[in-house]
Amino acid sequence: MRKKLFSLAIPALFVAAVAVSCKKDKPVTSESNEVATTKDGNQYTLDTLNSKVEWKGYKVFKSESTSHFGTIKFESGDVTVKDGKLESGKFVADMASLTSVDLKDDAEQLGKLNGHLKSGDFFEVEKFPTASFEITKVTPSTEGDYNTLLDGNLTIKGISKPVQFKANVSVKDGEVSVATEPKDIKREEFGVKFQAPAENGVIKDEVTLQISVKALEKK
């Protein structure tokens, strides 16, 4: 439901997952997984028009919970396939493309929220213009609704953290598709600590990210 606009933090990602791999600054801190994958195999390029990070943030106001949700576009990425299976990949998101979908019909409120999320209170997009998720390990899974476990490094605002996504991965006819589960991350672990005055509601630390990517084999 829509109450008055509130500011929140997403993803990405991811942005996916997104992580933030800043073009201007090296990571401030790192708790990254060691990369166990390689680029030994067939190379695929991310289809940026058909790939995105979906995000959702939450606020509690009195006894009610509200949310905003939206997307972040990818600017680049690559995938390696070895013996017909996903071997590795890295996806870089354009943080300037971050936008709220639920406010798309309210231009004024959309502009306010998007502007705040990109400001120094949240993602500092001018300083940290990109986000990335790098796969460090791929493990087949036969449990539940997902066929793969993806371990990787998520970096936001120069801070890297290990994250594991359950995902459905498909490699077929020169195309790789990866669709992750919705995954909660804690925004404060990535330096996104803004909190509005209590009377305006409490912005939750948890932000939900879901990564959906397609990659096409290089000819």
Image (cartoon, grey):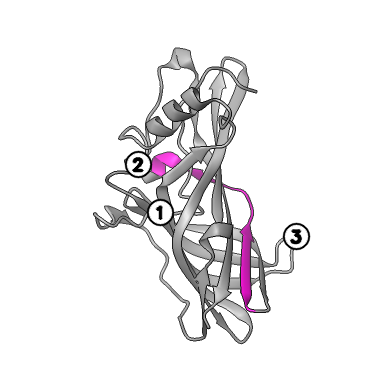
Quarter containing the N terminus = top right
Under circle 1, the secondary element is: strand
Q: Residue at x 33, y 43 (%)?
A: 125
Circle on res. 191: 2
> Along the line of sight, which residue is nearer the eye, 126 or 39?
126
Horizontal and vertical percent for residue 181?
Answer: 64, 53
Question: Along the horizontal axis of the image, is 84 left or right of 89?
Answer: right
Identify the image quadrant of residue 66: top right
The residue that disc 3 covers is 144
Q: Are marks 2 and 3 in contact (CB under 8 Å)?
A: no
Q: Would residue 186 be counted in the magenta stretch?
A: yes
Q: Residue at x 50, y 57 (%)?
A: 163
Magenta stretch: dominant secondary structure: strand
Q: Is residue 14 visible?
A: no
| Side (left or right) of 175 relative to 128 | right
Q: Earlier in the sequence, mark 2 or mark 3?
A: 3
Looking at the image, residue 31 sits to the left or right of residue 56; the answer is left
Q: CA distance from mark 1 to mark 3?
A: 29 Å
In the figure, 181 relative to 101: above or below?
A: below
Q: Residue 53 at x, y = what percent? A: 54, 51
Residue kind at label 2, given as amino acid type = Gly
Query: Which label's residue is closer to the chain start, 2 or 1?
Result: 1
- Mark 1, residue position: 131
Classify 10 Å Cα crowding around label 3: few (below 14), some (14-19), many (20 and above): few
* Residue 148, disc: none
Looking at the rendered structure, the kind of residue marked 1 is Ala
Q: Amino acid at mark 3?
A: Gly
Taking the magenta stretch, the answer to whether it contains residue 196 is no
Q: Which residues are magenta?
A: 174-189
